[in-house]
Image (tube, rainbow, N blue to C red):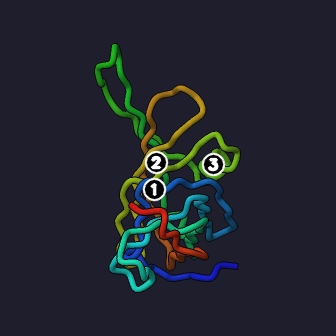
Amino acid sequence: MWKNTIENAYEHISLHDCVVNLVEHNENSFSFTLDNGFWIMPDSKYNPYNETLRTDQSKIRFIDLDKEISAFYVLKRHYLFRKYLYTTIKQLKFETLFQKINSKEWEMEFYDQYHTSQRNLFFGSINTKKKIGALDFQLNLDCNKMEYCWNHICPDKKW
């Protein structure tokens, strides 16, 4: 059980440089577990320390996901003799993403996030165990609610 759970608190939380370690899912919802937590902004009412600090292990839940509108894309840059040629974009099924993260083949690291009332857009990179080069991702999620869950803010883990 989590001590703190807040809904749709986009302005209070940053996922920059946060890594997804586990995915749990059911028919219309899923959650990301972040072993090293996420960032809570200094001006947030949930952060009494007045500095951007990381939480302990945390979870992000995406509830009532519309899979028809939501999508996960992987972007791969192609090079020849270290010269950039082009980028390919491939849409993957969510089940593929979940399987690769849970099997530890992939680690998903966030860079940027954008939110509206129901739409959530995330950008980041995929770290793989194979030497296939850099993979970037774009995650478009349409859900009714996002929940951010954690137990403690760690004052020793500053931005």
Q: Which mark is residue 73?
A: 2
Taking the view exactly as shown, the residue that stands out farthest to the bottom is: 45
Looking at the rendered image, the quarter that the N terminus falls into is bottom right
153 vs 100: above or below: below
Amino acid residing under circle 3:
Ile
Query: What secondary structure is marked by label 1?
Result: strand
72 vs 20, nearest the viewer:
20
62 vs 136: above or below: below
Q: Cα distance, mark 2 to mark 1?
A: 6 Å
Mark 2 or mark 1, which has the lower sequence index?
A: 2
Mark 1 or mark 3, which has the lower sequence index?
A: 3
Q: Cα distance, mark 3 to mark 2?
A: 15 Å
Taking the view exactly as shown, the residue that stands out farthest to the top is: 81
| In this rendering, position of residue 94 left or right of residue 77 | right
Q: Residue at x 57, y 75 (%)?
A: 152
Q: Residue at x 62, y 70 (%)?
A: 29
Q: Which mark is residue 101?
A: 3
Looking at the rendered image, the quarter that the C terminus falls into is bottom left
Amino acid residing under circle 2:
Tyr
- Camera-nearest label, 1 or 3: 3
Residue 106 shows up from this direction: yes
122 vs 88, nearest the viewer:
122
Q: Position of residue 52 (x, y in %)?
A: 38, 69
Q: Position of residue 64 (x, y in %)?
A: 57, 75
Query: What secondary structure is marked by label 2?
Result: strand
Residue under label 1: 139
Q: Quadrant of residue 59?
A: bottom right
Q: Position of residue 125 (x, y in %)?
A: 45, 45
151 vs 126, nearest the viewer:
151
Q: Residue at x 65, y 79 (%)?
A: 2
Is there CB contact under 8 Å for labels 2 and 1?
Answer: yes
Is there CB contact under 8 Å for labels 3 and 2?
Answer: no
